[in-house]
Structure formats: structure tokens, C-alpha cells
Image: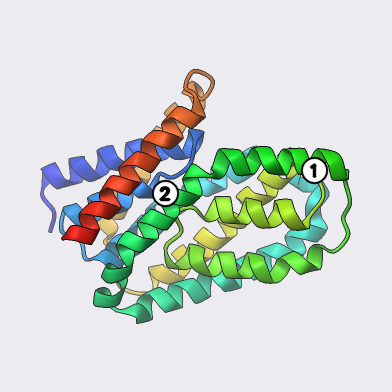
Amino acid sequence: MLDWFQYLFIGLAALAGGFVNAIAGGGTLITFPVLTVVGLPAVVANITNTVALSPGYLGATIAQWNDLKSQKKRLYLFVPASVVGGIIGGVLLLNSGERLFRSLVPFLILLASALLAVADPLRNYINRRLSVRGASLEHIQYAILPIMLAAVYGGYFGAGLSVIVLAVLGFLINDSLTKLNALKQAIAFSVNIAAAIFFVFSGQVNWSAALVMAVFAIIGGSLGGKLAGKIKPSTLRWTVVSIGVIVSIIYFIR
């Protein structure tokens, strides 16, 4: 059982995570390590983190609904693939065992930090590429398998998933970056909500911590949404990347 100080620590981390997710992404690099610091086993911390933060993806998806309405064909293909992949990732996590997953944590955090670091250059590259190619709806079926594989990663750990999905969409689908961003958000929501629902029945969710995190993450997300125009996303993103690298080093030497 956690004490009031640990709940406060978790709540503040979730507040920061929700704030960061609303502006730059990468909130898991803040919330997951804090859950392990207060004593939760790595697998339980990861599962609790997924369940607690998944509602935030719904709000972001709804906010971009206007850019999704014209992409029903893509949603019909990608959402089922995302759900299946997210559940597979959850199954792999539950069957990894604490020892194996903990040994993978520093590598996963370092990978997520690297993905976050290349987010801006990747987005700029995709934007230039799309402006040259023009728009087309052809060959979207080739993106199904890569999306499912990304979803497996998302269900297993999740941090940096949006960067992977945007890269897949940008290379395999021709459309505006605005629409691809909206599609990326819908896919991330599908992966996380599928994994979260699966985890609900795993018996490994720390519900008191998840509830505290969910409340504070929503508040943080709201603050981030209001201050988004006043804070440079790249500055915040590199701050989170730095935190992720430091945390991964700590995990490596523990």
C-alpha cells in the first residue's frame, strides 16, 4: 500500500506526463519510472501506466475528428489491426515475467527517447515528401502489417509509439500531414485502449495509483492544451528526451 507522499509523487508525475503529452509527447518517460521508484514492480508499473493514461488518447482523437471523418476506409483497416496488435503486445508483456521485462526496461526507455528525439526531423521530412508526391489513397493495405507490428510494441511498452506510426503512415500513404497526424492519434488510441481493457482483467493493475494518475493526467493535459501556444514543443521534447536518457542510464547501472 502506498502512502500519501507516494500518491502525491505519482500525481505530480502524471500531471507532468499529461502536460507533456498534450504538447510534445513522451509523458510515459516521466510516469513509468516514477511508478517503479515508489515500489511498483516493473510489469505492474507498465500496466498501471497504460490503464491510467489511455483515456487521454480519447480526448485527443475526438479533437481531431474532423480530419478523421474522410478517412473511414483507413480506419476500417487500421483500427482492427491496432486492436489486435495492442492485445498481442499485452499478452507478450504478461508472459515476459518481471525479470525479463525489467532487464528490457533501460533499452525500451532509450529506444523511446531516440524516437522522441527524431520526431521533429521525421515530421519535417514527411511533410516535404508529401508536398512533392501529392495525395493518393492507393496501396494503404501495405501499411496494415507495419501498423500491427507497431501496435504490438505499443501494447508491450508504448512510449514512442506515435513516432513509429507516423513514420509508417508517412512512407506508405500519400495525404496531408494534418490528416496523417489525426490517423496516427486514432491508431494510438486504439492500441492503448485495447491493451488497457485487456490489462483490466489481468489482476495486475494498481487501481489506487491508476485513479490518481488518471485524474492528474487529465488536469495536466488540459493545462498543456491551454499553454500549447506559449511553450515551444521542441524545447519540451528535448527536455523529456534528456530525462529519458538519464533514466535509462540509471536503469543500466542499477
Q: In the rendered image, which quarter is residue 238 located in?
A: top left
Instruction: Find residue 196 and report its horizontal and vertical position in percent.
Output: 45, 63
Instruction: Find residue 18 and report its horizontal and vertical position in percent.
Output: 41, 39
Question: Quadrant where the N terminus lies?
Answer: bottom left
Callout count: 2
Q: Is residue 222 above or below residue 117?
A: above
Q: Which residue lies furthest to the bottom in this view?
A: 95
Which residue lies under the disc numbered 2?
A: 113
- Residue under the image location 61 percent in, 66 percent down: 82
Instruction: Find residue 72 and report its horizontal and vertical position in percent.
Output: 80, 55
Q: Is residue 246 above or below residue 74?
A: above
Task: Looking at the picture, tell me which residue is in the foreground, 10 or 132.
Answer: 132
Q: What residue type is labelled 2?
A: Ser
Task: Looking at the picture, tell me which residue is in the foreground, 98 or 225.
Answer: 98
Identify the element where label 2 is drawn.
Answer: helix
Q: Residue furthest top?
A: 230
- Residue under the image location 78 percent in, 47 percent down: 69
The circle on residue 30 is none
54 with respect to 5 (left or right): right
Q: Which amino acid does label 1 sit on?
A: Leu
Which residue lies under the disc numbered 1?
A: 130
92 with respect to 16 (left or right): right
- Residue under the image location 77 percent in, 68 percent down: 142
Question: Quadrant where the C terminus lies?
Answer: bottom left
Task: Looking at the picture, tell me which residue is in the foreground, 209 or 86.
Answer: 86
- Residue under the image location 37 percent in, 34 percent down: 239
Disc 2 to disc 1, C-alpha distance:
26 Å
Instruction: Find residue 141 and report its horizontal and vertical position in percent.
Output: 79, 68
Task: Looking at the picture, tell me which residue is in the foreground, 181 or 120.
Answer: 120
Q: Can residue 48 be seen in this view?
A: yes
Identify the element where label 1 is drawn.
Answer: helix
